[in-house]
Amino acid sequence: MTKPVIAIVGRPNVGKSTIFNRIVGERISIVEDIPGVTRDRIYSSADWLNHEFNIIDTGGIDLGDEPFLEQIRAQAQIAMEEADVIIFMTNGREGVTLQDEQIAKMLYKTKKPVVLAVNKIDNPDMRELIYDFYSLGFGEPIPISGSHGLGIGDLLDECAKYFPKEYEDEYSDDVIKFSLIGRPNVGKSSLVNAILGEERVIVSDIAGTTRDAIDSPYTYDGQDFVIIDTAGMRKKGKIYESTEKYSVLRALRAIERSDVVLVVLNAEEGIQEQDKKIAGYAHEAGKGIVIVVNKWDAIEKNERTMNEFTQTIRDQFLFLDYAPIVFVSAKTKQRLSQILPLVKRVSENHAMRIQSSLLNDVIEDAIARNPAPTDKGKRLRIYYTTQVSVKPPTFITFVNDPELMHFSYLRFLENRIRETFDFEGTPIRIIPRARE
Ligand code: GDP
Ligand code: GDP
């Protein structure tokens, strides 16, 4: 399911990240009295009443030393490209400034709905400060206070009016959606081009929505696939496209829409912190994962190199022990033909359902081999396990006391399940629950 996206735009220090945090519901970024404070998270899912949506704080995409106009142009551009609704945020205590007017001018060009918010209206007496802001030309300004949490509901109500009526799944269920994520220059676009250029790939006319015209649908071996766009695959040029925050933002958006994510590493550069972060997002999102080591042509190798590289990946990505690894070269096309069959297999595993009777046989057998732990004289009892959903496969296991289910025992059960059924490439989730 694709969710509507709200983007917050505004000059520095009007309170964008404060509001973002309010909406997201936790204090996830540091707010200080200096403009452009460090923020880590700029994209998050959130909900309001019965609406689920994603929200972007475009102020968090920091372009370093670029002048104000460039910074703000990038923000406005990102909002216009990524969002369904734009919140244009201003500061009621300072009135309309020249910078607000400059931003307004940029936003006039968009066809997307713009909701004007006047922040720092901390009490009802200050309400009259909003009238000045009609002059920006975006209709009725909505008074809010980030620090007091006032007016946020009204603001979100207004945004929700513009959410697309229905976000259907964009492609039918038997289409495999996947994306390539990774740092800039690891070779994502080269890989996409190489895959699309393969002999047995036929460009397909399966209908997608117009929302993401850069998706590439095609058919391989009778199977429909869609490659979901990420930042690195678009034409480069805009200054923000090379910033880390922006590529993370694009990656998160692509991950969300994918069944399977190819985490692309660059053999020449080895594994870097950012690779782990990116892979971590895909894991957390519960997507099928394939690790693709690209540029395999570019390094010197002997017969041990691949095993050593594999070991390094296993050591560095402990949480991805289920993900298959493939060593390829977009340049020489080495092993590229393995990628799509692997994506297909992982996608099938990601959607696999296991019969309860089989599942419980496996669990009982596991318990017989390695009895459930005790804690303070109380033994964990596992009554019954059942799969409640797919993508990723999720199991609920009914127990006498969930507190007794330690991480290590969960891990043991997971491994037994993995040994019996082919869940290669997909995370699986086991949730202990007290039996009523
Ligand atoms: P950003 O640069 O637009 O993301 O702004 P921040 O969220 O970092 O906020 C800038 C400053 O304004 C911080 O000192 C906040 O504490 C303060 N601030 C944010 N919202 C409000 C508000 O509703 N009322 C008041 N009085 N201060 C606020
Ligand atoms: P992206 O930013 O991840 O999309 O990376 P690109 O596909 O734009 O590739 C970045 C650079 O790496 C380009 O100069 C490519 O020619 C080069 N490149 C990509 N794949 C390979 C490969 O398999 N081998 C070698 N030697 N170079 C590659």
Image (cartoon, grey):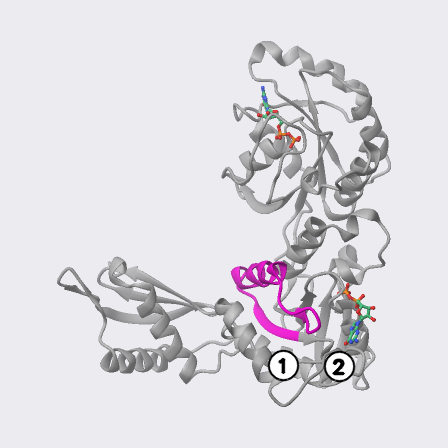
Q: Indicate which label's residue lies in the foreground, 2 or 1.
A: 2
- Report the amino acid beneath label 1: Leu
At horizontal 73% and vertical 16% (from top left) the residue drawn is 95
Determine whether the residue tagged by mark 2 lies in a helix, strand or loop: helix
Q: Is residue 70 above or below residue 243?
A: above
Is the CB of the residue bearing disc 2 within 8 angstroms of ligand 2? Answer: yes
Residue extending farthest left: 377
Distance from the alpha carbon under mark 2 to that under mark 1? 21 Å
Judged from the image, the quadrant occupied by ligand 2 is bottom right
Q: Where does the N terminus fall, quadrant-wise?
A: bottom right
From the viewer's perspective, is 90 left or right of 312? right
Inspect this view and state whether residue 230 appears: yes
Determine whether the residue tagged by mark 1 lies in a helix, strand or loop: helix
Residue extending farthest bottom: 303
At horizontal 68% and vertical 64% (from top left) the residue drawn is 181
Name the residue beneath numbered marker 1. Answer: 342
Magenta region: 264-292
From the viewer's perspective, is 90 left or right of 239? left
Tag on residue 182?
Answer: none
Residue 431 in percent (x, y) is at: 37, 63
Inspect this view and state whether residue 221 appears: no
Number of numbered discs visible in the structure rendering: 2
**For marks 2 and 1 on the same chain, the one whose residue lies earlier in the sequence:** 2
Name the residue beneath numbered marker 2. Answer: 297
At horizontal 44% and vertical 82% (from top left) the residue drawn is 421
